[in-house]
């Protein structure tokens, strides 16, 4: 081949190769992904960030981390800096905020402050002392309470405020002995101490004065603690809870020592100091409180067919006995309670006896028994207008010879005082069995000492000697409903039970104790 021809062929080949290279380059450029700039997505919500990245042709890889500064579901960081050129289809890793990490709050009550701080800070919580105060049941420097309840889920970094105990507050014991119970209560209340009272007969300490205290005066003791004090009942106390005459009139008043115990208003049981007129409420049970008996430190009464007792300071009310029968009388004598039940459907009625603690129930006799009177070892009662006598243990039950009696008797000092159908008052001497007429037009007798107090046919309060002499009207001759002789006082109701009053035995010094809707 000629040289010129060779040069021509080489030129054509070079041109062809160059064209092929250019074509290939064009094809490569055409099918290669284009470069894109990475958008900034920090602070955006995950949904917004995902949309931005996908719109740029990039993929998203998600992970999560807790953050105290970035809101939940917002982007904390991205793996590629904003503005970086990437090829389409490349992935960008983003870290999404899971919000603030939460922990379950433990119970640190009763822990020492050091222990509580260690527990809480180990969970990433802050601790502060909000208050320090005296607390009798939590030791000094221990946690009383925490500002957030145990078991609550709280954010890490939250501050928990603790209330820390300063231990029990200490107070000086006041001197109580030799003073009145009322003053003792006031002194103890002033220093924040509680008290428990027991009562005791004392030949040397006046009634209602403090005999002793179990913590010596001046001793440092915990505020809120209990002091045991012994209070005097005086030289003597009742063994008989009330007179039979008072109880047969409904038993709305009784007496012991310096106090009269009465049911006033609509069943409110109170005690009234005979010297000062001070009234202390003991119990309010509504209509129906009656048959009040006071023996030592206990007041016994009937309410709603159930026998109750309460201490003479108004504490410790409790049920003694619930009878299945309808009880219409109750009397306390020498450690026993006697009650009478009325005949009703399925119940025989009769007289029953039990101990003052509610045990040892015994039936004494059957039938509707009225005007119960327990004297010594005998129980006297009226059944079908006949007077009966039975031993207190239920033996030797028999009718007494003589009069057919009306529905009212009183037995005092070896004598029976009774009213017949004509409202004539008689006296029978139990020793000689002799009978004596005393007066006519008599109702509701109440024998006390050497005197008989009674209402005449006009319901005026009168009195006479137990031999029938010295009959006279007591007081101003006011019409009355029921009368009670309690110690050296007469307590009585006016007609329609509009008020309950008391006066001296001669009728002077009348005062209103209260109003009543349920008496009688």
Image: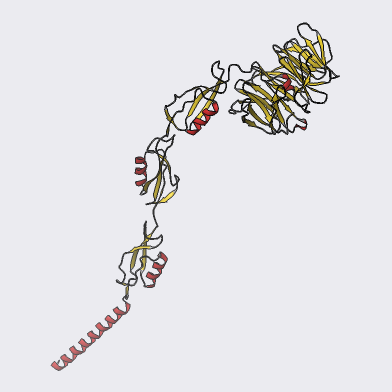
Given the current orientation, which residue lies at the most extreme right position?
A: 422
Left or right side of 518 for 129: left
Which quadrant would residue 471 be assigned to in this image? top right
- The residue drawn where x is 49% and y is 33% is 190
Given the current orientation, which residue lies at the most extreme left position?
A: 3
Between residues 472 and 221, which one lies in front from this camera angle?
472
**Figure disc tally:** 0
**Residue 305 visible (yes or no):** no
Q: x and y percent of residue 488 in the render?
A: 67, 21
Q: Is residue 68 above or below residue 407?
A: below
Q: x and y percent of residue 283 in the render?
A: 63, 31
Between residues 63 and 13, which one lies in front from this camera angle?
63
**Residue 169 visible (yes or no):** yes
Q: Is residue 429 above or below residue 150?
A: above
Left or right side of 47 for 515: right
Q: x and y percent of residue 304 in the render?
A: 70, 29
Indicate the quadrant containing the N terminus: top left, top right, bottom left or bottom right: bottom left
What colouring does the structure picture have? secondary structure
Between residues 489 and 111, which one lies in front from this camera angle?
489
Which quadrant would residue 381 be assigned to in this image? top right
Between residues 306 and 15, which one lies in front from this camera angle?
306
Indicate the quadrant containing the C terminus: top left, top right, bottom left or bottom right: top right
Which quadrant would residue 261 be assigned to in this image? top right
Q: x and y percent of residue 22 in the render?
A: 26, 83
Given the current orientation, which residue lies at the most extreme top position?
A: 432
């Amino acid at each position: 081949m000629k040289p010129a021809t060779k040069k021509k062929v080489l030129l054509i080949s070079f041109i062809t190769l160059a064209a092929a290279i250019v074509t290939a380059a064009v094809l490569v450029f055409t099918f290669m992904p284009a470069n894109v700039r990475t958008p900034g997505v920090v602070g955006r919500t995950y949904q917004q960030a995902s949309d931005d990245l996908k719109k740029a042709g990039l993929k998203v890889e998600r992970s999560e981390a807790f953050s105290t500064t970035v809101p939940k579901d917002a982007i904390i960081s991205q793996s590629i800096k904003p503005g970086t050129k990437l090829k389409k289809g490349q992935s960008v890793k983003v870290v999404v905020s899971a919000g603030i990490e939460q922990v379950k709050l433990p119970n640190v009550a009763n822990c020492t402050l050091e222990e509580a701080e260690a527990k809480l800070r180990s969970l990433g919580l802050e601790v502060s002392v909000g208050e320090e105060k005296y607390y009798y049941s939590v030791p000094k420097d221990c946690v009383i309470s925490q500002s957030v309840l145990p078991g609550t889920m709280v954010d890490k970094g939250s501050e928990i405020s603790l209330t820390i105990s300063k231990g029990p507050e200490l107070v000086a014991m006041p001197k109580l002995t030799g003073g009145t119970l009322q003053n003792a209560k006031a002194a103890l209340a002033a220093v924040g101490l509680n008290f428990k009272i027991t009562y005791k007969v004392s030949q040397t300490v006046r009634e209602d004065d403090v005999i002793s205290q179990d913590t010596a005066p001046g001793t440092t003791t915990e505020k809120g603690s209990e002091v045991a004090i012994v209070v005097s009942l005086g030289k003597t106390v009742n063994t008989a809870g009330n007179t039979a005459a008072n109880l047969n009139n409904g038993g709305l008043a009784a007496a012991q020592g310096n106090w009269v115990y009465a049911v006033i208003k609509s069943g409110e049981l109170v005690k009234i100091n005979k010297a000062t007129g001070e009234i202390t409420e003991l119990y309010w049970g509504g209509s129906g409180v009656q048959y009040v008996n006071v023996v030592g430190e206990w007041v016994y009464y009937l309410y709603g067919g159930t026998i109750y007792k309460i201490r003479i300071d108004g504490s410790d009310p409790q049920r003694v006995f619930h009878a299945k029968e309808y009880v219409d009388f109750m009397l306390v004598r020498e450690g026993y309670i006697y009650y009478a039940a009325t005949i009703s459907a399925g119940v025989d009625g009769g007289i029953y006896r039990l101990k003052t603690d509610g045990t040892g129930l015994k039936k004494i006799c059957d039938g509707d028994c009225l005007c119960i009177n327990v004297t010594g070892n005998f129980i006297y009662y009226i059944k079908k207008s006949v007077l009966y006598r039975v031993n207190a243990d239920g033996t030797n039950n028999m009718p007494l010879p003589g009069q057919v009696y009306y529905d009212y008797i009183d037995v005092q000092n070896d004598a029976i005082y009774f009213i017949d159908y004509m409202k004539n008052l008689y006296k029978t001497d139990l020793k000689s069995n002799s009978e004596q007429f005393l007066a006519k037009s008599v109702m509701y007798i109440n024998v006390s000492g050497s005197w008989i107090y009674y209402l005449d046919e006009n319901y005026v309060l009168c009195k006479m000697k137990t031999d029938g002499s010295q009959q006279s009207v007591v007081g101003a001759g006011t019409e009355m409903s029921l009368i009670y002789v309690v110690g050296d006082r007469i307590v009585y109701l006016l007609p329609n039970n509009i008020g309950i009053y008391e006066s001296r035995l001669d009728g002077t010094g009348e005062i209103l104790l209260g109003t009543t809707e349920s008496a009688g």
